Image: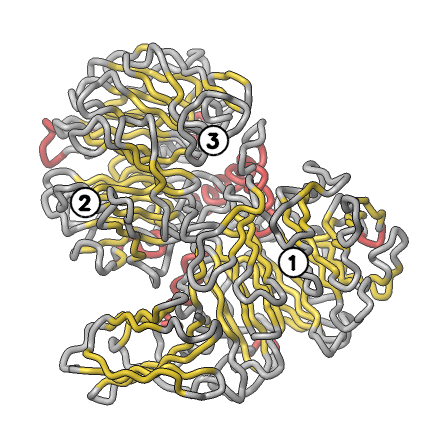
Amino acid sequence: MASIACKNNRTEKEHEAFEKEGTEEHEDGMEKWMEQNAMMTMDPALGYVPYERLDAAQQYTKSLMNNATLRTNALAWSERGPNNVGGRTRAIFVDKRDATGNTVFAGGVGGGIWKCTNFKSANYTWILLTPDLANMAVTALAQDPTTPNTIYAGTGEGWFNSDAIKGSGIYKSIDGGLTWTVLPTTQNGGTSGDFEYIQDIVVTSSGTVFAACRSGRFCNVGGVQKSINGGTSWTRTLGTMTSACADAINFRATDLEIASNGDLYVSTGTQSDAVANKGRVYKSSNSNGAAIGDLSTWVEITPTAIPSSANWRRIEIAIASNNSTIYALCQLTASSAIGAIMKSVDGGTTWTNMTLPAWCDQGTTKTDFTRSQCWYDLIAAVDPNNANTLLVGGVDILKTVDGATNWQQVTQWSSGCSLGIANIHADIHNILYYPSSSNEIIATTDGGIYYSTDGGTSWLNRNTNYNVTQYYACDIHPTQTNYFLAGAQDNGTQKFTQPGINTTTNARGGDGAFCHIDQTDGQIQVVAVTNNDYRYSRDGGTTFSAVSGGSSSTGFFINPTEYDDALDVMYTAAAANTYGLITGFSGSGAPTYQVVPFTDLGGKQVTAFKVDPNVAAGGTVWMVGSNSSVPVFIKVANANTATPSVITSISPSGFTNGCYISSIDVENGNPNHLLATASNYGVNSVLESTDGGTTWTNVEGNLPDMPVRWGIFAPANAMLNSSNTGGGIILATETGIWCTSGTTVGTSTVWTPQNTGLGNVSCYMLKYRESDRTLAVATHGRGLFTTVIPSVATAVNTVQNTKGFITYASANANTLFIKTGTLTGIKNMQVSVVDMQGRTLLSEKTNYGNQSLPINRLPAGGYIVKIYGNNKEQYTQQFVK
């Protein structure tokens, strides 16, 4: 019972914390998205987000994908990019096996483990090593210094940003990163929850592994974990509780550092008001031998807080190569700002409060270079050749060469400061000096990876094909085959215009959100910044201008919107009992935003819209108000005016009180057939109505308990499984794409994951183009993907792919890539490419092995690749060129 009490107490405090954190807006508004995403995903019965349930959902999804009997390849996804924009990255290291320093491993917080073998080259390339990893939230990487083929990867981003993905433990590779296996004692976060969020991992020269952990559920698990047998078993060596959560200390370990003499340091404390969870620093001397890091060997060396009555929260430490100089970056308890940079020259026995840097931010000079987000972005690194040269990162990077007395800013993200310095993406999460080099440095950010060869003065982008971009939304052009828009976390709204994997351009910077392309006039396009702040284009996306009257303070941070193609107007969420209306997109002046009073919402905000496609004249819209009590579904006529009229308004049974309705769809051809999804844990997440919304049926079936972000009706002739039954439903969920074919059967509805080529990645939105059956998905961690929905008449014949024969097949505009598996005894294979009408367009016999086949003469569209081995092995998959 004590553990249960700690669980509830702990998690409620965390939920309260992220609602209160941060007093100034950040470029990506992380605090605001944290609050919104928590509202969208919390279990209404608990009042907080039960992140631990995600791991079970991920494992279940993977088990179905690995089951040849249950797996279906109806939707074969193709990556579209971006190949020039990175995403949030916390984990990186330079491979010790490569003396040139060209081999680098990186982990995206939602995009898996990546490898580059020519990092210093202008023509560098990244390879995704883990497309099918059960959990893609890689936050820590460590290589064994004496057995460098052994690499550990920690999962789970435990820094309290609410778009963070919970981990599923620690993965291990013993073949240099080619294959990965979760350590059984850490799987699902471990039996007690110790390994739900891995903040850091280090490996000593003797192969002992230390992990800095925290739990998302319990106040008395996590801490520092130690393994002396390669991760087979673990012992908590830091983290104690006497009787209650209030006296549980050091269970939130954050930073681990090994000095060159083998001494081990750890800092604890993240985002919490509790004194018990305040930031501390500990040291375990290498003189302890095999006992290093054991409970009895830790000596507290925490710098005294300033003022002395205060407490630190997060503390980030950096150790100089001389072993005695230590820097500690300390977060203030009250404001989450940087409170001090402390320095010790005697191994932590005594500390001196050093000068905080002067940082220019949007035209104003200040000393808080994290903009009150120490809990999110805070890092430091010492030059391996000079203990007085230190780089610190928050929003930007700053440098001192005299031991933190004087500082210079070396990177700048925001405009407003004419400093003439390097521009790299905001939010610095890691800084890594190359061994023995004062000049070569790697920095990881919210926008990916950067490389400096001159000590941080200039920086080279290293994000080409490193696609870990976190999209919120997307849209698809009505006539231009390869034109898409997608709104990203802290990376703006991006335009895709080419076949295959794209180099995108920005339609708008900052945070991207919902975006729209007029389906009757593709020249008209709309992108959102945040809230009700919009930009529009009338020239096909070449230029964008501001919508008149928009507001960055109303509506949700990532604001739900819907575009009415028949009338060239847009509907937006606004305050309770209102909705926003933007008119004039097809006119000559700027479109105008207005607020329409709508008390029928019953005190709720609109969380989902859908224009009824069965009303050709437009103006008939379904609006759903939710997130308190029972959702209200309202069918509105004349929604494009200031005087809308209600056709239907109902608060139906079947929906969980307090659920957040994330999407609603109306079948084209049947206005009474409705679909609604809810993004919370612990609720009925997929419901269907066949009588115009009067009654709803729970069709969640075998879906795991996870957020469902979006849902659409499939085309009536869609072939989504082997049943040869058309139609169905397609869902974007926290573990990828799920489908059901034909007619649902209530709670007995069978859903199957459709993640071939996509992986087990969080998906936020789906958009479909009827003319060529193209379906696009905005993923939150792997960019944009597309597929062609097969029809019953032309679907891939149901085959059971031979296990281990082919790992995957994918394509870009010019080449079909085939990666073979590990089967032996196969000499050759026959490869055929068939179009969706069943015509064979390419047939070639090749040796068994990885192949790159030219397809540049094929027009853009969907195809089927069929591969047969000389021993009757077979593999069939759809792909999109």
Residue drawn at x 50%, y 43% as measured from the top left? 491
Q: Which of marks 2 and 3 is in front?
A: 3
Mark 2 or mark 3: whose residue is earlier in sequence: 2
Q: In this orientation, which residue lies closer to the viewer: 13 or 745? A: 745
Quadrant in the rendering for residue 568: bottom right
User: Three-letter amino acid code at disc 2?
Assistant: Asp
User: Three-letter amino acid code at disc 3?
Assistant: Trp
User: What is the crowding at mark 2: few (fewer than 14 residues within 10 Å), some, or many (at least 20)?
Assistant: many
- Element at badge 2? loop
Residue to which mark 3 is pinned: 413
Residue drawn at x 69%, y 41% as measured from the top left? 546
Residue 252 image offset from top left, x and y in percent: 37, 36
Q: Is residue 253 visible?
A: no
Mark identifier at residue 836? none
Residue drawn at x 27%, y 30% as measured from the top left? 266
Quadrant in the rendering for residue 501: bottom left
Mark identifier at residue 517? 1
Residue 810 image offset from top left, x and y in percent: 36, 69
Residue to which mark 2 is pinned: 95
